[in-house]
């Protein structure tokens, strides 16, 4: 057995391409690159390339386990990747109708016209979990090496670039000491490493900070909270897509809800809320639970059954928050690269397209045996000349317009719509969301936990009940993957200034302030973590660092 004093001997594996993250972007990159290599070999070109030299890492226990989305898919990207996708892709249902509503506490007003960004004719309601499993199967058939339950713990830096990752060690106890089943992480070296981790990926975060790749604006995020229900028959049309504004959010906040009708009387319900609200005691999970009590929503799911729960952050910043997506030996794609269209609330199609463009760039680099930043900058040029830029540049100031509330944002949006995305100010600047909290400036009194929202256990639920329905599990005896860099701030300054917002913004009851022997203590229930990354984003002091736990841990978003 290894000991703390012994140097860790890691096995080194070499690949042409290493893709971290098996979501739509990462799998699209692997599949398209394998197709290019297959054509390359058939034409007898040199150098010799093989799909077996493509490695894909996925930290979930299986492909798709950590994939959570609304999810309405614009098929544009998938049609380019798999032209005959309708024949085999697990599409739940085409969108058959849509509507937008404004909610007050007790009533709803249907907008006479569905706003164009929320019109979904030609799109599909999908389970992202199932879609990604299907894509993973196509990738494996090409001979690509796909490794589940392995997380990229740290990047291997090489001057002004990267040359691979080190995967997480397995079999350490909660104090970091090796157990009898200890297995050191692998050192995976690659000519090109692609970061496709989704929003706020831990490797991409470190890379952007270290190499100063930040975009014009800091990234903006929202938290999406979702439940999948089995509703009584006849409550909602299969393929119906509804979006809501208003209650239970106030006009100072950016966000809204959704109601999607799926096959077999299933209903997808959710809310997405920008992580830039002012009240540090606002509770996104509680707001979503209240959303379900609205008469319009309640009449759909009352008498039904909760099947699944999940939470995930989404990148709202758009074009002006994009980090520089290339460096020596590396690329950043998908949500990690800020490629979600926040106006349409869609990013699957752009993620897939970005993966394809990255694959084309990598193929050209491998053929030229040049993996420098200069060679890989072709990826950025491909983005600029693709429909991704056409779509995202037209909404480049959209989310920033809402930093002063809903009504001001709608006015800005109207001006942007008629000016090709420019509006009154271009570029419109914005601060990071965690800077928007109002200070409470109160005493050292902790909140009374008995007053927290508990739900009725039928229509509404507490956090722990929802976490159970997320399928989340972690090995209990492992190092905590949520690192609080300055814990003294949590038990003193944060109590007084902000009332410990981690207790509110976390949708999984991970953070709890407790009194023990007369002393205030932060208790971290890391085994509850659904990997949404909200804590890493929304902490007002930026002292929470989300690191990868042992691969295979986390939620299991089956069917979501």
Image (tube, helix red, strand yellow):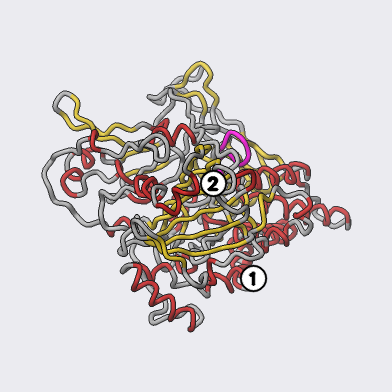
Q: Secondary structure at mark 2?
A: loop
Residue 401 in percent (x, y) is at 38, 71
Disc number at residue 68? 2
Residue nearest the viewer, comparing 438 with 381:
438
Query: Badge 1: few (under 14), some or many (20 or more) residues near its Cα, within 10 Å?
Result: some
Circle 1/circle 2 CB separation < 8 Å = no
Residue at x 20% of width, y 36% of height:
448
Q: Is residue 326 left or right of residue 475?
A: right
Residue 120 occupies which quadrant of the picture? bottom right
Place residue 103 in its image quadrant.
bottom left
- Which residue position is annotated with label 1? 386
| Other residues around mark 2 within 10 Å, as few (<14) / some (14–19) / many (≥20) | many
On residue 472, which mark appears? none
Point out the stretch of residues depicted in magenta.
Answer: 60-68
- Place of residue 477 in the rendered image (x, y in percent of width and height, measured from the top left): 43, 23
- Asked if 47 appears above or below 305 in the picture, the reply is below
């Amino acid at each position: 057995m290894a000991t703390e004093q012994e140097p860790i001997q890691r096995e080194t594996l070499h690949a042409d391409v290493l893709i971290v993250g098996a979501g739509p972007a990462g799998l699209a990159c692997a599949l398209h690159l394998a197709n290019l290599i297959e054509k390359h070999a058939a034409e007898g070109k040199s150098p010799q390339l093989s799909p077996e030299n493509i490695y894909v890492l996925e930290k979930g226990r299986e492909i798709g386990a950590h994939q959570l989305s609304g999810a309405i898919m614009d098929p544009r990207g998938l049609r380019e990747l798999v032209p005959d996708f309708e024949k085999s892709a697990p599409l739940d249902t085409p969108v058959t109708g849509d509507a937008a509503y404004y909610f007050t506490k007790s009533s709803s007003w249907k907008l006479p016209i569905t706003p164009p960004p929320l019109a979904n004719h030609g799109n599909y309601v999908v389970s992202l979990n199932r879609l990604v499993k299907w894509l993973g199967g196509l990738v494996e058939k090409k001979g690509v090496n796909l490794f589940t339950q392995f997380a990229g713990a740290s990047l291997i830096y090489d001057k002004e670039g990267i040359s691979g990752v080190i995967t997480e060690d397995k079999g350490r106890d909660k104090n970091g000491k090796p157990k009898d089943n200890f297995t050191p992480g692998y050192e995976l070296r690659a000519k090109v490493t692609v970061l496709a981790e989704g929003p706020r990926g831990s490797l991409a975060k470190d890379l952007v900070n270290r190499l100063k790749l930040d975009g014009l604006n800091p990234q903006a995020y929202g938290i999406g909270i979702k439940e999948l229900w089995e509703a009584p028959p006849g409550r909602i049309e299969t393929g119906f897509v509804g979006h809501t504004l208003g209650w239970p959010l106030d006009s100072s906040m950016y966000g809204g809800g959704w109601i999607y009708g799926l096959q077999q009387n299933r209903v997808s319900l959710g809310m997405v809320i920008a992580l830039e609200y002012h009240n540090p005691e606002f509770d996104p999970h509680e707001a979503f639970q209240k959303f379900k009590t609205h008469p319009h929503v309640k009449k759909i799911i009352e008498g039904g059954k909760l099947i699944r729960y999940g939470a995930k952050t989404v990148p709202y910043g758009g074009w002006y928050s994009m980090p520089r997506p290339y460096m020596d030996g590396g690329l950043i794609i998908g949500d990690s690269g800020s490629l979600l269209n926040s106006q349409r609330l869609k990013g699957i199609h752009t993620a897939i397209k970005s993966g394809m463009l990255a694959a084309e760039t990598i193929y050209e680099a491998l053929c030229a045996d040049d993996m420098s930043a200069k060679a890989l900058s072709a990826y950025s040029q491909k983005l600029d000349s693709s429909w991704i830029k056409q779509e995202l540049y037209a909404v480049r100031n959209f989310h920033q317009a809402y930093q002063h509330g809903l009504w001001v944002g709608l006015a800005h949006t109207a001006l942007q719509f008629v000016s090709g995305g420019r509006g009154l100010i271009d570029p419109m600047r914005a601060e990071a969301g965690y800077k928007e909290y109002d200070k409470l400036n109160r005493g050292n009194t902790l909140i009374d936990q008995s007053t927290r929202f508990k739900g009725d256990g039928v229509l509404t639920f507490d956090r722990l009940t929802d976490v159970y329905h997320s399928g989340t599990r972690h090995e209990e005896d492992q190092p905590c993957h949520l690192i609080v860099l300055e814990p003294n701030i949590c038990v003193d300054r944060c109590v007084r200034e902000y009332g410990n917002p981690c207790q509110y913004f976390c949708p999984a009851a991970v953070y709890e302030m407790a009194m023990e022997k007369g002393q205030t203590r932060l208790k971290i229930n890391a085994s509850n973590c659904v990997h949404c990354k909200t804590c890493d984003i929304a902490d007002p002091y930026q002292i929470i660092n989300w690191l990868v736990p042992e691969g295979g841990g986390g939620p299991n978003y089956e069917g979501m």
